[in-house]
Image: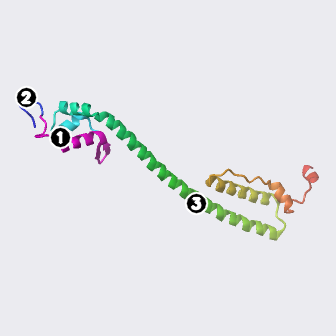
Amino acid sequence: MRTGKGTKREPKGNRGSHWDEIRREYVQGILTPKGLHYPSLSELAQRHGVSVSAIKKRAWKEKWAEERKKWKARLEEKIQEKRSEEIAREIVQLERKVVSIATISLNVAERKAKEYEERGNVSEYKFARLMEGVRTIYDTARTALGEAPELKVSVEYVAEFEGLNDETEDEAED
């Protein structure tokens, strides 16, 4: 409400709830369709029909600016916690998918290895490629589980062990 001198006067009576609302809007902001908006003291004066000087006095006396800073910090912390939780859930889902795909891939590799064993005349190259694939699958699954890849068996060793590499070391050097 305006007086004859062009200034606004405070609402009739000492309406504490009115001041509580003004303080809350200043400290916590106002949720709008565009997001959270932190109004200035001037905006609040206009919005609530109170003089800017009255709001400034009350805000200074009750340390609204400090409250707003603390509020924003707590809010940002909570937002970060929620984001972290969401990201953690997504990571867990992704890890489960990776492990599932790795399991399926290892089953396929196992069938292929049995097929090679049954044929008995598989080239060292084909077996080495299969073992490289197994190593990649294994490393990927271990990484998804948060563990360091540890499969260190050489492809050549496995090939020789399985009798797939009929060449001796001397013949391979020629």
Image quadrant occupied by the N terminus: top left
What's the amino acid at mark 3?
Answer: Lys
What's the amino acid at mark 2?
Answer: Lys
Quick one: label 1, few (<14), some, or many (20+) residues within 10 Å?
A: some
Report if residue 18 lies within the magenta region.
yes
What x and y, as percent, mark residue 171?
93, 53
Pointer 1 residue: 48
As helix, strand or loop, the secondary structure at mark 2 comes to loop
Q: Nearer the viewer, mark 3 or mark 2?
A: 2
Query: Gap between marks 3 and 1, in whole Å?
Result: 55 Å
Pointer 3 residue: 97
- The earlier-in-sequence mark between 3 and 2 is 2
Pointer 2 residue: 5
Quick one: label 2, few (<14), some, or many (20+) residues within 10 Å?
A: few
Residue furthest toward the top?
5
Region of the chain picked out in magenta, as a range? 9-36
